[in-house]
Image (cartoon, helix red, strand yellow):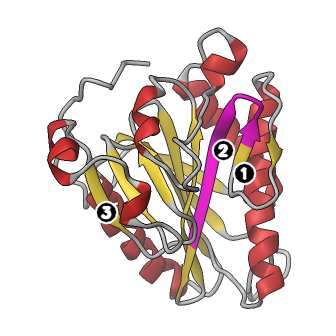
Amino acid sequence: MAFERHDQLARPLLEVYLLGLLDYEDALRLQRRFVYEVSGAHGELGALILCEHPPTISVGRQGSRAHIECDDEELACRNIRVRWVNRGGGCNLHVPGQLVAYPILPFQPGKSAIRDYVGRLETSLLGVLDEFGVRASRRPGHSGLWTPAGQIAALGIAVSRWVTYHGMTLNVAGVRDPYRILHPTGNGPLRVTTIEAERQRPAPMSRVRESLIRHFTAVFELDRFHLYSHHPTLTRQEPAHAYARSV
């Protein structure tokens, strides 16, 4: 992936936001704001949002309502929201215990550039999984990363104003039964796994976040970054949910 810059020796400054449990709508609004800011920064700025979401199903461009087994009434009873979004990929269930990463980076056009960008995202995730002793791989015809037990990471990106947004999810901990409501291929429920299930011991979210920052910045050669735990546009806190846990 190439960045446009006035000084070839300069690297974009990456602003990393560790935002904890974040409402999905707030994440969308924050991404739109960063897309605008990064697009006007001439390659000198990027952002990375790391968060978790309350139970939400996001449906990308390859997704369909038919891929969700529950009707609207059951989804409401389960307190699961559904949101159609302009990203690649299909349906993805977000729950606390899943780390969501939204890179907002300057981007150059071309299909090969898109493949390279997605490949770098996958490489950063593979580095994290290897660090925690989990072996995963790409699967032809499927997005994300998989172990023999199921999908452990998903990817889906969008590009606006030549800036990337949306991104990737990594299942760290938590219950896996809710994912069974997704039937993305028509061949039964989605099989998923988590880092904790694979390694049979805890994987603190703080350690996974720190690992992802290291691998992401190394893969994208971003040696200048600042860490933030809040953004001034976020004025409300998401209430705790039954799936949430302290880490």
Using residue 211 as the reference point, say whether residue 138 is left or right of it. right
Q: Marks 3/2: CA distance?
A: 27 Å
Residue 167's label in the rendered image is none
Residue at 27%, 60% (x, y): give it. 25
Compared with residue 228, is residue 108 higher up or lower down, i.e. above or below?
below
Secondary structure mostly taken by the magenta-highlighted segment of the chain: strand
Local packing at callout 2 (Cα closer than 10 Å; few below 14, some 14-19, many 20+) is many
Q: Marks 1/2: CA distance?
A: 5 Å
**Circle 2 sits on which residue?**
213
Q: Amino acid at mark 1?
A: Phe
Task: Inspect the magenta stretch and tell me whether residue 203 lies in it.
Answer: no
3 or 2: mark nearer the eye: 3
Mark 1 or 3, nearer chain start = 3
Which residue reaches farthest top? Answer: 201
Local packing at callout 3 (Cα closer than 10 Å; few below 14, some 14-19, many 20+) is few
Using residue 92 as the reference point, say whether residue 163 is left or right of it. right
SS for dot 1: helix
CB contact under 8 Å: marks 3 and 2: no
CB contact under 8 Å: marks 1 and 2: yes
Residue at 70%, 20% (x, y): give it. 198
| Location of residue 239 in the rendering, given as x and y in whole percent from the top left corner | 17, 35
Visible in this render: residue 68?
Answer: yes
Determine the image quadrant of residue 59: bottom left
Q: Which residues lie in the magenta part?
A: 146-157
Q: Amino acid at mark 2?
A: Ile
Q: Amino acid at mark 3?
A: Arg
**Circle 1 sits on which residue?**
216
Compared with residue 235, is residue 105 higher up or lower down, i.e. above or below?
below
